[in-house]
C-alpha cells in the first residue's frame, strides 16, 4: 500500500521567494526536511517548525455549498478577516480567505489568535464564480440578463475593457466589490481603468458585445 506524501506550504527560493507554494516532503531528519516544490520541482532544505500547533475547524464556502475541514494553526499566530491561506483538504489544497472568526463562547470577531479561535469561517478564492449582469448595446435595461462565469480568483476585470468568457463577450461598466475585499477606494467601481480581482467581486455590470445577443431572430 502506497503512503500518501506529506505536503507543506512554504516559499520556494527558485520560483516563489515571496509567496508560499505547495511542497512535497521527501525526507526528514536532524531538525530539517528535504522538500520539493510542486510548481517548479526545485528541491531544497527547510527547517522543521517545533512550535505548538492547534487543530481548528475551518468552514469553507464555495459557490452555494460549504464543507468543514481542519487546519493546524501555529501557537501565537494572529488571524484576521480578509487574510488568505492554503488549506489542505481531503479533496485538494485550496486557497481560502477568512470571512469570520468564531471564539469558544460563539462570539465572532475580526481578529484573534490561534489560542482563542474555535472555528475559522472562510471562502474559497482559488477559483470563483462571478455574478454578471449584462445589458444589450442599445441600453434596453428591461432586457438585461444575469449569468455566472467561472474564473481563477486572481483574474482581473477592468472597467472599460472587453472580456470573452464562457462564450460571452462583454465590456465591463461597473464592479461591486465584496465586503471582505480590501485595498479598494470604494465598494462600487465605475471609472475607466478601475479594476478588481475576481475573488473580490460581488457582481459585475457590463454591456453585451456578443454579435448574436439580443437578436429578434
Image: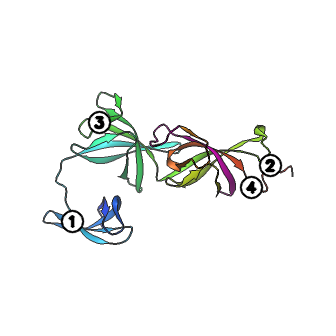
For label 1, the SS is strand
Question: Which mark is first along the chain, 1 or 4?
Answer: 1
Question: Which mark is first along the chain, 2 or 3?
Answer: 3
Q: How is the image coloured?
A: rainbow
Q: CA distance from mark 1 to mark 3?
A: 30 Å
For label 4, the SS is loop
- Queried whether the magenta region covers residue 180, the answer comes back as yes
**Numbered disc in front, either 1 or 3:** 3
Q: Which residues are magenta?
A: 164-186
Count how many numbered circles sit on residues in the image: 4
**Numbered disc in front, either 2 or 1:** 2
Residue 112 numbered mark, or none: 3
Question: Which mark is first along the chain, 3 or 1?
Answer: 1
Query: What residue would you read off at disc 4?
Result: 210
Side of 95 relative to 216 (left or right):
left
Report the residue at 69% width, 55% height from top.
Answer: 168
Quadrant where the image shows the N terminus = bottom left
Q: CA distance from mark 3 to mark 4?
A: 48 Å
Report the residue at 57% width, 51% height from top.
Answer: 157
Query: What residue would you read off at disc 1?
Result: 33
Would residue 1 be seen by someone viewing this image from the given angle?
no
Amino acid at each position: 500500500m502506497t503512503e500518501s506524501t506529506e505536503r507543506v506550504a512554504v516559499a520556494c527560493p527558485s520560483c516563489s521567494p515571496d509567496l508560499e507554494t505547495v511542497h512535497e516532503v521527501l525526507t526528514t531528519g536532524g531538525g530539517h526536511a528535504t522538500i520539493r516544490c510542486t510548481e517548479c520541482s526545485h528541491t531544497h532544505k527547510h527547517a522543521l517548525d517545533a512550535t505548538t500547533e492547534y487543530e481548528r475547524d475551518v468552514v469553507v464556502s464555495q459557490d452555494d455549498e460549504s464543507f468543514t475541514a481542519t487546519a493546524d494553526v501555529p501557537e501565537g499566530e494572529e488571524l484576521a478577516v480578509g487574510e488568505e491561506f492554503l488549506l489542505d483538504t481531503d479533496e485538494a489544497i485550496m486557497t481560502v480567505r477568512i470571512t469570520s472568526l468564531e471564539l469558544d463562547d460563539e462570539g465572532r470577531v475580526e481578529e484573534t489568535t490561534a489560542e482563542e479561535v474555535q472555528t475559522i469561517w472562510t471562502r474559497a478564492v482559488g477559483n470563483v464564480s462571478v455574478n454578471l449582469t449584462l445589458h444589450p448595446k442599445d441600453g434596453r435595461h428591461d432586457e438585461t440578463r444575469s449569468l455566472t462565469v467561472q474564473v481563477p480568483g486572481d483574474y482581473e476585470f477592468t472597467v472599460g475593457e472587453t472580456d470573452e468568457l464562457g462564450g460571452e463577450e462583454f465590456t465591463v461598466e461597473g464592479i461591486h466589490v465584496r465586503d471582505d475585499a480590501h485595498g479598494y477606494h470604494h465598494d462600487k467601481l465605475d471609472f475607466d481603468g478601475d479594476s478588481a480581482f475576481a475573488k473580490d467581486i460581488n457582481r459585475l455590470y457590463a454591456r453585451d458585445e456578443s454579435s448574436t445577443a439580443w437578436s429578434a431572430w
